[in-house]
Amino acid sequence: MKIGILGAGIVGVNTALQVQNEFPNAQISVIAEGFGNETLSSGAAGIFRPGTSFSAGNDEVTQKWITDSYDFYNQILHSESAFEAGIMQVSGYIFSSKSPSITKNHFLEKLLPIYRPAGDDELEICPSPEGSSAWKYGAYFQTMVIESSSFLPWGLKVFESRGGETKQRRVEAFTDLLGDGYDYVINCTGFGSKWLCNDRKLVPIRGQVYKVKAPWVKMFYYGDYDTYIIPGSTTVTLGGCRQFDSYKTEVDRYDSASIWDRCTSLLPSLKRAELVREWVGLRPYRDPVNSFNMGTCGYGVTTSPGSAIHATKALKELIRSGKVDNSGSTTAIMIVSKL
């Protein structure tokens, strides 16, 4: 049996690993135009934190994706592969001056080892944006950072060590693969699916961040909605913005000024941080999330192992019965296709 995985970002790599685990004797290829730093995933801060509005179709499926993903990453975190895979434990705070609901996350409160309200003294750790002595609301939690710059090459290394192949090529239509002998193809092309699948509901949500060197920053910090400071192994990510239906891939100086002002206000020591680069990416957003593995917006790192397990289950069902059981999901266009 020959299986193709389209896309080599975090979704594609995690899907390749899950499919390979389920079908160890299959001939499996990851096919992509870009790998590693050429993918959207490479710029992600990679913190394991789904937004409270994220949905995979219904509450049960959504929580399963998130729980399965956490279990997958947590197993690697506690293995000898953690460093090479770019997975590290991190803790920090989310603050709000607007509403206590911003600091809560029903997906994580029962999943993470620690998720609790911030104490009065902790609300004074970072300056409040309104000039008061403390934020009104806050929470402290312990989670993980998954750095795609390390995870992607590690994942492909594992995939290839088990007999998988990688092929660099541009695929503009599924018919491009008809002569290659694939029995099944799984689409993990992210925003590229807008054209590959002619999916008008898939839209970009533009994001922009700084990558800086600030080795003294060991914890993450969120301030209200789109202000965040997330440490990695070598750089700290400062963000951000969410611009619906924006196709602009260039750095915007007004966004740069806003992000820098908000982040240095939240953590003033960042004013002396060394700038490494600025980065822009177009997150693939779809309401509802479609085809198991596309449209997860900024939560691809967080949810991709879970969505990969879901897609692998769909593949098993397709092989067994010739059709996919869509119950419990919002699938309208199959990512799992028989060629």
Image: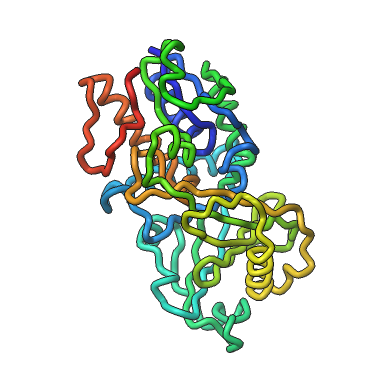
Q: Residue at x 65, y 38 (%)?
A: 37
Q: Residue furthest bottom?
A: 132
Asked if one can make out residue 25 in the rendered structure from this viewpoint, the answer is: no
Q: Position of residue 219 (x, y in %)?
A: 62, 63
Specify the quadrant of the image occupied by residue 310. Answer: top left
- Image quadrant holding the C terminus, namely top left
Q: Going by the image, does 334 lie left or right of 266?
A: left
Asked if one can make out residue 280 in the rendered structure from this viewpoint, the answer is: yes
For this rendering, which residue is in front, 138 or 43?
43
Specify the quadrant of the image occupied by residue 290. Answer: top left
Q: Where is 105 relative to 331, above or below?
A: below
Which colour style is shown?
rainbow
For this rendering, which residue is in front, 312 or 241?
241
Q: Position of residue 100 (x, y in %)?
A: 41, 76
- Image quadrant holding the N terminus, namely top left
Q: Residue at x 66, y 59 (%)?
A: 252
Q: Position of residue 285 (x, y in %)?
A: 43, 49
Disc tally is 0
Q: Going by the image, does 331 lie left or right of 161?
A: left
Q: Position of residue 303 (x, y in %)?
A: 43, 46
Q: Residue at x 38, y 48 (%)?
A: 286
Q: Where is 336 relative to 280, above or below?
A: above
Q: Where is 78 relative to 298, above or below?
A: above
For this rendering, which residue is in front, 314 or 137?
314
